[in-house]
Image: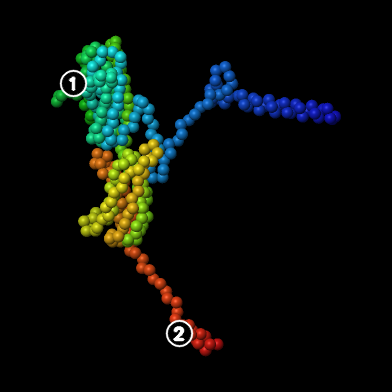
Amino acid sequence: MGNSEIYAVILLFVLATFALVAGCQNAAPADRQLIPGTTRPILITTPAPQIRDNFSSVPLCRFQDNRTFTITKGYPFTFNQTVPDRDISEVRIWMFGNNTYWETDLPVRPNGSIAVNFSERQTSVLPGYQHRIIFQYPYQKNQFSITARIDEDHEEVHGPLGGVIIDLRRIREGKMNGLDAADILENAIWHSGSGNTSENITFFTLTPVIYVDPVSDHQVGDIFTVNGSTDLEAGEKINILIDPAWKPLKAHYPAFEGSTVVYAGFCGNNSWSVKVNLSGLPPITTWGGGYSFAAFSDNPNLGAYGYASFNITAAQEQTTTSPPSQGQVDTVKTTLQVLK
């Protein structure tokens, strides 16, 4: 084979390689969509994973947008809703959840909005997980096509013709899913006549928790720090109690009491720490831990708590060995000479 033929083969190989690379670059994977009129794929992004620490089930950032909210039980919650641009002075509010329903009329403020307010006490007793709030707008100034009859003998939602469309007692008794009732209500509102519109928001209730990092065994009199994480808000007070884990001993043994404050972390995954002094606590050692470490929220509406257990052992006595005296050394030397 001459040089010209060798060069031709090399050239063909290079061209084929470039064609292969170009084809790989231009071809979109089967699971990618293409930008119209091009061979360029649309970039598909996936949400970042929710990062969790070793002791907490709380994600660093909980999902929240302008129609979906996470409410921590025990904290107040307010939602402002702008009403449609028409002559409305009241809006009917419905809330449905697990074994829960609620209905009331709220006045429209001068700025054309309403405010849904839940107090600390109200959010602390909210059951379940997912809830939906429906805003029902009147078809005339203050006339609603869907109404509720709630008294000693009735817990019902009535449709435009007066018939019962939802038996609210079934929700309270757990025989009907509250979110199914919300779907029925919205469907009835939208099909009851012109102008009978509604909007909704969804919220999830989250019970606050205090997480305590594992506590290792310690000796009487030790001073050390215990750390943890929590979804309580920054600035909340956490009380600490260390006492015997076995209930009959609690009334007869001393206890350590202290407190600390939550400091801000990232996206609500906050932290706390407290210094512990075991002076005055007698040793107790059991298989499951002789002492309990309890951390609980100072605000009773929050109801957050965390727990760990550990043992307290007796302090080890420090013993020192004195070097032998000169006389003892001389005796040893004499003995060795005799043995020789």
Give the Cα separation between the discs numbered 2 and 1. Answer: 105 Å
Q: Earlier in the sequence, mark 2 or mark 1?
A: 1
Instruction: Name the amino acid type tagged 1.
Output: Arg
Q: Amino acid at mark 2?
A: Gly
Residue 58: image quadrant is top left
Looking at this view, name the residue that lies furthest to the right: 2
Mark 2, other Cα within 10 Å: few <14 / some 14–19 / many ≥20: few
Q: Position of residue 54 (x, y in %)?
A: 41, 45
Would you say residue 285 is visible in this rendering? no
- Picture coordinates of residue 330 (x, y %)? 48, 85
User: Disc 2 vs disc 1: Cβ atoms closer than 8 Å?
Assistant: no
* Relative to 76, residue 210 above or below: below
Picture coordinates of residue 308 (x, y %)?
A: 33, 50
Please state if 318 lies on the left or on the right of 35 as rendered.
Answer: left
Badge 1, how many Cα within 10 Å: few under 14, some, many 20+? few
Instruction: Say which mark, if any, is on residue 122.
Output: none
Residue at 35% x, 27% y: name it.
68
Of residues 274 and 291, the one nearer the viewer is 274
- In the rendered image, which residue does mark 2 sit on? 327
Q: Which residue is mark 1?
A: 149
Q: Is 245 situated above or below 152?
A: below
Viewer-proximal residue among 150 and 197: 197
Q: Is residue 22 above or below residue 324?
A: above
